[in-house]
Image (cartoon, rainbow, N blue to C red):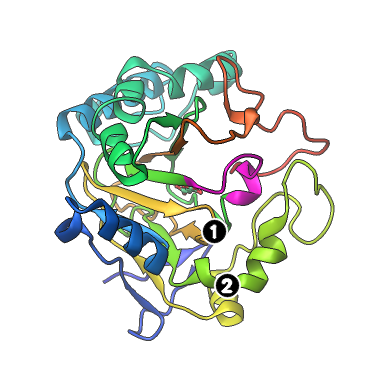
Amino acid sequence: MSALTSFGYELDTSPEKFGELRESNDILDDAEALRQRMVADGYLFLRDVLDKKVVMAARREILERLASIREIDTANYPLIEGIASGQSERRRVDIKPFNEDLRTGEAIRALVHRGKVIQFYEKFLAGDVRSFDYIWIRTVKVGGATGSHYDWVYMGRGTRNLYTSWIPIGDVPKIEGALLILENSHKLEELKNTYGAMDVDRDVDGPYAGGWFGRNPLAVQEQLGGRWLTADFNAGDLLVFTMHTLHCSLDNCSPANRIRITSDTRYQLASEPVDERWMGDTPIAHSGRRTPTRQT
Ligand SMILES: O=C(O)CCC(=O)C(=O)O
């Protein structure tokens, strides 16, 4: 196996420090067992539960938009492969509407706001479900990665009974930048009450300004303990986790120069309070903050 890195730091893949995410397909039809597993593990990893056709339609939609600014090598590879061209016409387009269009297409909405994901949450949460209107789409080129963080820091103004769905839009093997979850990090009460209690738009100074707990996964592990867990993700898989499950990503080191395409969206009971920053036709997101910061 090639070295797995995050921000260039090579992970220790010995069994004490690293492992595979536990799959929960065996309890998929038992909502109470899923809830108990979420309490125990801080995440649910479900293989092949989404409609692959819907996932791949979303992939095509995103890639068509990226190809329109010449970021995809369609001269040498089929569009759907998502191979980066090494070029971009991003500077020539009005980037705000472009990005908005990228994350709100009809096929993406069909994937994250309707169908199997919603059905899963209706069962898991046992009620009417509301998803955040804001949709996060990540198109990560080779070299890109995400630092360790709790999602609560970015979206903690509503119910705590809120979950992230991380969805690979196409296959995402480890080497192409899979997500990492720090085992048992949802049980770290001190971390939850310190770093985990911050609000990135309010607490704009201090060691965690910008929202990440850290970039170096080895240092994070040294400080907090636990194994980094991940998987080779396939189109159709769904990873669900709590607001206080520490996660980051591997570097995208795709030998094929493939862009990593994923979505992370949030779901809660419709009856519970919402974080208004992420709701409505044009969510304000982090625009109320005083200093610029990293993306969620
Ligand atoms: O996909 C990534 O790299 C990061 C995703 C993330 O931070 C999230 O799902 O909250």
On residue 294, the disc is none
Please say if 101 is above or below 296: above
Identified by mark 1, the residue type is His
Q: Going 60% across and 76% down the picture, which residue do you hit?
A: 219
* Residue 73 appears in view: no
Q: Going 54% across and 61% down the picture, which residue do you hit?
A: 7
* Residue 93: quarter of image: top right
Q: Nearer the viewer, residue 167 or 244?
A: 244
Q: Magenta includes 170?
A: no
Q: Residues within 10 Å of mark 1 (few under 14, many from 20)?
A: many
**Some atom of ligand 1 lies within 8 Å of the CB belonging to the residue at label 2:** no
Q: Which residue is mark 1?
A: 244
What span is in magenta? 152-162
Q: Is residue 19 left or right of residue 53?
A: right
Q: Which residue is mark 2?
A: 188
Q: Secondary structure at mark 1?
A: loop
* Residue 141: quarter of image: top left
- In the rendered picture of this protein, how many numbered marks are placed on residues? 2
Please say if 241 is above or below 129: below
Confirm or deny contact between disc 2 and disc 1 (CB under 8 A).
yes
Q: Is residue 11 left or right of residue 203?
A: left
x, y (%) of residue 237?
A: 24, 47
* Residue 182 appears in view: yes
Identified by mark 2, the residue type is Leu
Per the model, the C-alpha gap separating discs 2 and 1 is 9 Å
